[in-house]
């Protein structure tokens, strides 16, 4: 994963506080204080593992520091069940870490796995799969790292690092021309992307000299027309890039990619990814 040490520590701390509260009363009642154990985390479903650094931090904060990764993140694994991590230490500490560690690992691996499926679906088209801001509040940086692990590309991290002028911005500014001019004046070094819903809006935005068009909920035939319009008026992808968004599924993503757009943004990567199945098996030592 990308460098996230500080963010991981904080997120794990909050997650453990939510789960442990004042202590694991079941383990304190049933597991001897001096019991030692060896825990194996097993991937039970084919997909891409992501989040091992979060598992290790969860273990560390619970008092387990002997953690060994057995696989490389970001690689599709078909042959399951398979061990992905081994941890040794206090049995109580391992049990305290279990649910939080598996929650993170399953969710992030699910995001990476779904992203890998989308990326594989468009291989050979020249189209790049992007994520969106439709992330779980508080987990964006981890979810976007999972998208990258699965072969996607991160779009903007937030409202602070890229300009995307949408319908409401245009209305508030008093029109597209005013919105583009204001954005270019305020942030002259930033590329400008504009959301458009039809060919008329696309043609008008191209006339404003923007850098990218977000083609919102356009059908594949309309996307092809938008690509042709761009190629005729803005010098192809080297002049203005095109991003398709809205209604994208694994069933239609290749058809969308084959229209000639450079990017497809998929909110489902982060808001609808199914959890990948893992379990932790504990053996007393």
Image (cartoon, grey):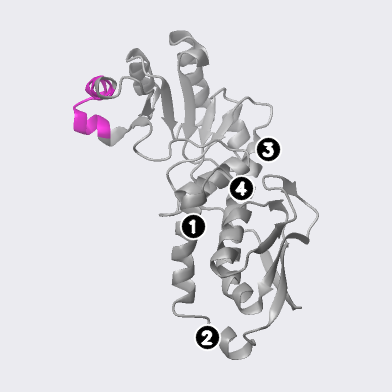
In the rendered image, which residue does mark 1 sit on? 9
The mark nearer the N terminus, 2 or 1, is 1
Residue 250 seen anywhere in this rendered image of the structure: no
Image height of 223 relative to 147, above or below: above
- What distance separates the C-alpha of mark 1 from that of mark 4? 21 Å
Residue that mark 2 sits on: 25
Check whether the beta carbons of the residues at disc 1 and disc 4 lie within 8 A of each other.
no
Camera-nearest label, 3 or 2: 2
- N-terminal of the pair, mark 2 or mark 4, is 2
Tag in front: 3 or 1: 1
Residue drawn where x is 45% and y is 17% of the image: 240
Query: Which one is nearer the viewer's eye here, 41 or 172?
Result: 41
- Between disc 2 and disc 4, the foreground one is 2
Q: Quadrant of the C terminus?
A: bottom right
Report the front residue among 7 and 208: 7
- Label 4: element kind: helix
Badge 3 or badge 1: first in the primary sequence: 1
Q: Residues within 10 Å of mark 4 (few under 14, many from 20)?
A: many
Q: Is residue 171 magenta?
A: yes
Q: Earlier in the sequence, mark 3 or mark 2?
A: 2
Measured in 3D between alpha carbons, the distance from the residue under mark 4 to the one under mark 3, in whole angstroms, is: 12 Å
Marker count (numbered): 4
């Amino acid at each position: 994963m990308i460098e996230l040490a500080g963010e991981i520590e904080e997120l794990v701390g909050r997650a453990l506080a939510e789960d442990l509260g004042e202590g694991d009363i079941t383990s304190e009642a049933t597991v001897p204080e001096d019991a030692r154990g060896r825990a194996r985390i097993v991937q039970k479903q084919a997909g891409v593992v992501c989040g091992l650094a979060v598992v290790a931090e969860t273990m560390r904060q619970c008092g387990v520091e002997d953690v060994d990764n057995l696989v490389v993140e970001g690689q599709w694994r078909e042959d399951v069940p398979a061990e992905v991590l081994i941890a040794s230490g206090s049995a109580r500490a391992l049990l305290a870490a279990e649910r939080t560690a598996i929650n993170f690992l399953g969710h992030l691996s699910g995001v990476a796995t779904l992203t890998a499926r989308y990326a594989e679906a468009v291989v050979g088209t020249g189209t790049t799969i992007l994520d969106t801001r439709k992330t779980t509040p508080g987990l964006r940086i981890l979810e976007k790292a999972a998208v990258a692990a699965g072969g996607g590309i991160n779009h903007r991290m937030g409202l602070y690092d890229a300009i995307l002028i949408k319908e409401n911005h245009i209305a508030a500014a008093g029109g597209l021309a005013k919105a583009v001019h204001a954005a270019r004046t305020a942030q002259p070094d930033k590329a400008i992307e504009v959301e458009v819903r039809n060919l008329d809006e696309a043609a008008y935005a191209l006339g404003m000299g923007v850098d990218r068009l977000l083609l919102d909920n356009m059908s594949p035939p309309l996307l092809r027309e938008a690509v042709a319009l761009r190629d005729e008026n803005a010098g192809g992808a080297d002049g203005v890039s095109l991003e398709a968004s809205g209604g994208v599924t694994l069933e239609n993503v290749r058809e969308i990619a084959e229209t000639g757009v450079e990017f497809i943004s998929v909110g489902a990567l982060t808001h609808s990814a199914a959890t990948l199945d893992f379990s932790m098996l504990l053996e007393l030592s």
